[in-house]
Image (cartoon, grey):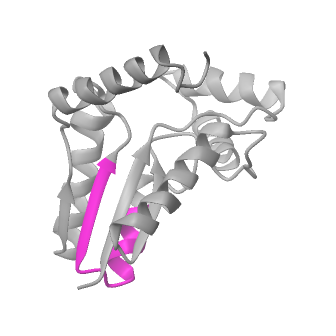
Amino acid sequence: MRRIAILVGHGQLPKDLPRELRSEYFRLRVKHAKTPEEEKRYQELDRTVANWPRNAENDPYWHNINKLAGLVREVSGFNEVIAAFNEFCSPTLEEALEYACRQGYEKIMVIPTMFIPGGVHSEEEIPEAIEEMKRKYRRDIIYVWPFDLQEIAGFITRRLNSSLEGGGEGD
């Protein structure tokens, strides 16, 4: 069975996005009543931001979530593990789900990198995107969330204890 995992991260703006583009982008992003011209410009800027060339220097978050996807692929046995983003980066979750469906994966698993329940991305936006793709493609898409808070507490405790023993970063 061909399986793919999609790691969903928040996304952020690249550090080298020019200040004037950043300012215009956020000004239009928060404006509720946009004129048709402003909406068109916002969509252009949104595509520019999402498709901005990224690397470890200008977007360490993007770099590390893609690095994590590679590490998960190495140990998971999945045919493919890719990163997707809620905003500011591409591919979006919708784009990643489209890709997975069109590639014919029989099992599509979506797992956010946001561990704590209560966020709008994990609780609303991601499930809505998954349901839309399930209806459109009739595929088995599994949302691996929420995480068990006990497991998260155990992970955090191990990191704290490791740091106390001199084994963690930032000592």
Seen at 53% across and 47% down, the residue is: 65
| Residue at the (54%, 20%) spot, across then down | 166
**Count of numbered badges drawn on the protein:** 0
Look at the image and say whether residue 158 sits in the magenta stretch: no
Question: Is residue 43 among what the camera can see?
Answer: no
Task: Determine whether, in the image, residue 133 is placed left or right of residue 114.
Answer: left
Q: Considering depth in this image, is 77 or 137 the residue closer to the camera?
A: 77
Q: In front: 158, or 39?
A: 158
- Return the x and y of residue 61 as percentages of the image width and height: 60, 38
Residue 51 placed where, x, y %? Answer: 67, 53
- The residue depicted at 22 percent of the width and 27 percent of the height is 117
Q: What residue span does the magenta drawing correspond to?
A: 96-111
Q: Is residue 166 above or below residue 128?
A: above
Left or right: where does residue 84 sit relative to residue 3?
A: right
Check the image and report above or below for 161 versus 38: above
Which quadrant of the view contains residue 28? top right
